[in-house]
Image: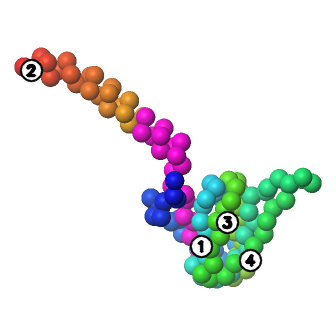
């Protein structure tokens, strides 16, 4: 199944001052876009054969990075910066679960409204 091309929610915008850092949990597939300024990004730790390690990237205005694993990210600004986080859309299991919940809700609503309709006839 191809990945959705549009994001269901608007991006979260963060404005950082010099020396400020943003610490936030990011889901796998989150897209981080640097709108202006220069930032350093520390991605969630990943496990390797020798232990855990965290990837660090330096990004400038216009750069984009995709979070490959869910976890806590740190965005540090060396000067004034603005970053945008685009959360990924729901995955296949979440869409399936939401669909099942919606169907159960409709059936429950129909079951509670049917006797009322029968009495009015």
First in sequence: mark 4 vs mark 1: 1
Image location (x, y in percent) of residue 110: 26, 27
Image location (x, y in percent) of residue 66: 64, 65
Mark 1 to mark 3: distance in Å? 14 Å
Q: Is residue 85 magenta?
A: yes
For label 2, the crowd category at 10 Å Cα-Cα, with few meaning under 14, some 14 to 19 and many 20 or more, is few
Residues 74 and 59: in front is 59
Q: Which residue is mark 3?
A: 22
Residue 58: quarter of image: bottom right
Is residue 84 placed above or below 107 in the rendered structure? below
Q: Which residue is mark 2?
A: 120
Is residue 113 placed above or below 76 in the rendered structure? above
For label 4, the crowd category at 10 Å Cα-Cα, with few meaning under 14, some 14 to 19 and many 20 or more, is few
Residue depicted at x 75% and y 73%: 57
Mark 3: secondary structure? strand
- One can see residue 5 in this view: yes
The residue stretch that appears in magenta: 80-100
Mark 4 to mark 1: distance in Å? 12 Å
Image location (x, y in percent) of residue 8: 44, 58
Left or right: 7, with 103 as reference point: right
Please state which of the two labelled residues, at mark 1 or mark 3, is closer to the viewer.
1
Say whether marks 2 and 1 touch (CB < 8 Å): no
Mark 2 to mark 4: distance in Å? 69 Å
What residue occupies the far left of the structure in this picture? 121
């Amino acid at each position: 199944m191809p990945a959705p091309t549009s994001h269901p929610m608007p991006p979260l915008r963060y404005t950082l001052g010099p020396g400020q850092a943003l610490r936030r949990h990011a889901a796998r597939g989150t897209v981080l876009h640097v709108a202006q300024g220069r930032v350093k990004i520390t991605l969630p730790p990943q496990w390797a054969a020798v232990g855990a390690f965290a990837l660090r990237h330096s990004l400038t205005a216009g750069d984009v990075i995709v979070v490959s694993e869910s976890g806590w990210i740190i965005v540090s600004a060396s000067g004034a910066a603005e970053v945008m986080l685009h959360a990924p859309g729901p995955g296949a299991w979440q869409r399936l679960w939401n669909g099942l919940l919606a169907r159960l809700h409709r059936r429950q609503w129909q079951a509670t409204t049917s006797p009322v309709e029968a009495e009015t006839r």
